[in-house]
Image (cartoon, rainbow, N blue to C red):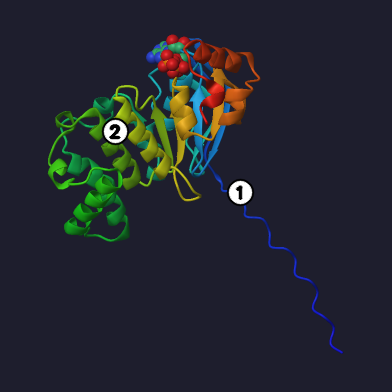
Amino acid sequence: MPLAPPPLDPPPPDPMPPDVLCLSDLHLTLRHQPVLNGLDLRMRAGQRIALLGLSGSGKSMTARAALGLLPEGARLTGGIHVAGQEVTHAPVLARPLQARPAMVMQDTLAALNPLATIGYQIEQPLRRQARAQGPRPCRRRIRAAALDLLARVGLEGGGALLSRCPPELSGGQRQRVCLAMALAARARVIIADEPTSALDVVTQAQILTLLRAICQGPQGPALLFITHDLHAAAHLCDEARVIAGGRIVEAAPMRALLSHPRHPASQALIASARQCGIACERLFA
Ligand SMILES: Nc1ncnc2c1ncn2[C@@H]1O[C@H](COP(=O)(O)OP(=O)(O)OP(=O)(O)O)[C@@H](O)[C@H]1O
């Protein structure tokens, strides 16, 4: 009688997606003042993390370090990897394209080139990618891809927008254009620093929903969401990191942070939100 085949080994568990952003032991001084003090932060594809902390705790400087946009005279040690590439001391323009996080800021006029048309700004990364695949990118195809992206970020009828410049758009439309540019560049990481604080509540909710739809799944970009708005953070992010004195003092799922903050800095944030009438334990209700 033939021997029964040996039982199959169970399939290996899905490997953890690799980190798309890794900040390790960052120390940053500006004008001889310490700003980041051993900051560690890792993000995987499709992960949405809220970076929370009091004013001056180092949130924006963390973002600027990751983006390669530190002010002149900044002294940085530690490690920065984006999409697996080591870029610790590389300013944004010296980085390979895939190691440039996309940014979505409150001040969209500063983030976009005010003199270049929306079409030019969205099509530029598309053209670059097409050129990497062949010498003569087809203009009509690139225009069609730009229109697709505008529709994806909720700017239907984008044809008329393509010939306009950023100052001719509303703040909400400019936020959507920034997101379309992030998609066009196939950014692995999106860093959003208070992106919705200048928008009305309806547009805020639409932009947060859009960010949520874009940043998910193992192929999606990771989102680092910097905010003082716990409502927005709870709506958008599954994970939270609390920064105080230039380092991460608490890393927790968003829900756990809101209901049981452990570090005194987290407790202070949640307590002040409660004083403003925000019922943190009900943010997920
Ligand atoms: N250009 C600069 N030169 C020198 N120091 C700076 C500069 N920009 C920021 N700082 C200092 O770096 C520290 C961290 O600032 P950062 O902007 O990261 O704080 P933040 O947490 O983003 O605050 P907020 O929530 O108010 O935006 C602060 O002490 C700030 O004064």
Q: Is residue 97 left or right of residue 158?
A: right
The residue sitting at 62% across, 53% down in the picture is 15
Looking at the image, is 46 positioned above or below residue 60?
below
Crowd tier of the residue under label 2, counting other residues whose Cα lies within 10 Å: few below 14, some 14–19, many 20 or above:
many
Q: Is residue 46 left or right of residue 107?
A: right
The residue sitting at 18% across, 44% down in the picture is 119
Q: Name the residue under label 1.
A: 16
The residue sitting at 48% across, 14% down in the picture is 277
Q: Name the residue under label 2.
A: 175
Q: Quadrant of residue 68?
A: top left
Label 1 is placed on what type of residue? Answer: Met
Query: Disc 1 or disc 2, which is closer to the eye?
Result: 2
Looking at the image, is 216 positioned above or below residue 198?
below
Q: Is residue 126 left or right of residue 215?
A: left
Asked if the residue at tag 2 contacts the one at tag 1, i.e. Cβ–Cβ closer than 8 Å, the answer is no
Q: Is mark 2 on a helix, strand or loop?
A: helix
CB at mark 2 closer than 8 A to ligand 1? Answer: no
- Residue 31: in sight, yes or no? no
